[in-house]
Image (cartoon, grey):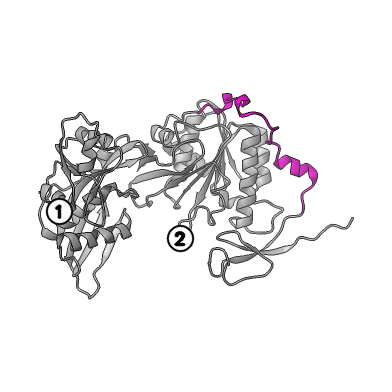
Amino acid sequence: MKAKKNKTIFRCQECGHEAAKWLGKCPDCGKWNSFVEEREAPELGARHVRQLTDFSSEAVAIDDVSLSSFARVATGIGEFDRMIGGGIVPGSLVLLGGAPGIGKSTLMLQVSAALSQKSRVLYISGEESLSQVKARADRLGVRSSALYLVSETNLENMLAAVEKTTPHYVIVDSIQTTYRADLSSAPGSVGQIRECAAEFLRLAKSKGMTVFLLGHVTKEGDIAGPRVLEHIVDTVLYFETERQQVFRILRAYKNRFGPTSEIGVFEMRSTGLCEITNPSQLFLGERSLNAPGSIVTTTMEGTRPLLLEVQSLVTRTNFGFPKRMVTGYDAGRVTILIAVLEKRIGLNLETQDVFVNVVGGLKIKETGIDLATACAIASAHSNFVCSPKCVVVGEVGLAGEVRSIAMLAERLSEAEKLGFERAIVPQSNLRHIHYKGKLEIIGVDSVEQAIQKIR
C-alpha cells in the first residue's frame, strides 16, 4: 500500500482556522497576516488512536459513579488552595498563564516543593537548564528528595521521563517550548500547542496525574499565543498584574472543579512569592487621608470582601477634547458615571480631564463600586476631602439613582474590622440587611445624597 504524503495546510495563529491556501485575513477572527504554512502529521495507526482514548469508560448510571478519587489535595499555600476551590483535584489539567517574568515558574516551584512532601513530583523545564532551576530552588529554600527535575522540550522524551519516574504531579515549563517531532511546524505554533496539550490531557486522565502547563501571553493578552488551550484544560489560572508591580494577583478564569471568582494575592520577595492573607489592609496601607478625590469602597472577589481605594483627579483640559483615563475599572462605565454627574447633578466636566485609578493593581468588574467612583470624581472636581472613616458602596443607574448590591453584610463586616465607622449604602439594601455590627449605616437613594453625606 502506497503511503500518503503529508498534506500542506495553512493555519491561523490566532484562532486555528485552517485553509487550503494562504489568506491575508482570517475569515473567523478577522486578523491580518496570521496564516502560517504547516504540514499535517501522518495518519495515526489504530494502536496509537487507542492510546489517545484509553481514559474512556463504559456507560454507567450516575448513581454508580464513585467519588473516591476526587479528594482534593491541599498544597499548604493558603491563597493558592482557596483560589482553586480548596485544593488540587487528581487527574486534572491546569494552565497557568501570565506575562514573562511575573513569577509563574517561581510559584510552581514552590507548589512543587509543597506537593513533594506528600507525593512524587516531576518538574520539566524547557526554558532553563537543570543548574538554573536548582539555583532558583536554592534561593527559594526548596529541598526535597521526591522532587525530580528534567530539562527537555521533546514531547516523546517528556513522556518517557514520566514513565520512568511515575510521578503524581507533572509541571511543564512551558507549553510553547514543547514540540512533537512528527509535526513540521515550529514550537509555539497552533498545531504544536494543540497536539502537545492533547497528549498531556490523555496523560492526566489515563494515569490520574495532575499536570500543570505554564504558558506566556502575547501582546494581545492571549495565553500561550493563540487561545486554543482554554477548552482543553480543566483550570485556567492567570496573573493579572504586571511584573513591575510588587504584588501579584492570581485569578481563576476557568475551573471545572471550583469557583472562578476567587483571587489569590501574593507579594514577590527575594525568597519567592509570599501569600497575603489580608489584602484589604495591603491595598489601604498607603492611603492619603487629606487628599480630595479619594474614596474607600468594598468589592467581592468570590466569597472574599476586599476594601479598595478609588482615586480620581479632575483638572482643566488643555485641548479641545477632554481625556478620560481609567486604570483598574471599566472605562465605559466611568464615562457613564461622568455623564450622570453632568446631567443629574450639574457638575461641569465637559472641559475637564478625568483620571480614575483603583489602587493596588486589581481589576474590578462588578458595578458595586459605581457610587464610590462617582463620589471620588465629585470630590476631586469640587476639591473637598471625604471622611477618612467612611466607606461607600452601591451601583449607580442612568437616572442618578443608587441601586442595591449583593452580599452587603460581608462587605460591612470587613470594613468594621479595619476600623471604619460609617458606611454609605443603597437605601434599598436596608430593607433586608442582616448586619449586626457597630458601623453607622447611612442609606441613600441618589448620587446627590451620597455626595452630601461623604463630606
Q: With 374 as the anchor, is 45 left or right in this view?
A: right
Badge 2 crowding class, 10 Å Cα cut-off, few under 14, some 14 to 19, many 20 or more, is few
Residue that appears at 41% across and 33% down: 82
**Residue in the foreground of this view, choosing between 143 and 323:** 323
- Towards the viewer: 49 or 274: 49
Q: Which residue is mark 1?
A: 448
Question: How far apart are the two marked residues, 1 and 2, measured between alpha carbons?
Answer: 41 Å
Q: Where's residue 395, x and y in %?
A: 26, 49
Q: Which residue is mark 2?
A: 219
The magenta span reads: 43-72
Q: Secondary structure at mark 1?
A: helix
Residue toward you, 89 or 176: 89
- For residue 293, the mark is none
Q: Mark 1 or mark 2, which has the lower sequence index?
A: 2
Q: Report the amino acid beneath label 2.
A: Lys
On screen, 94 above or below 118? below
Does residue 292 appear to the left or right of 173 in the view shown?
left
Eyeballing the image, is 62 above or below 394? above
Q: Is residue 444 left or right of residue 404?
A: left
Residue name at image x 17 percent, y 65 percent: 315
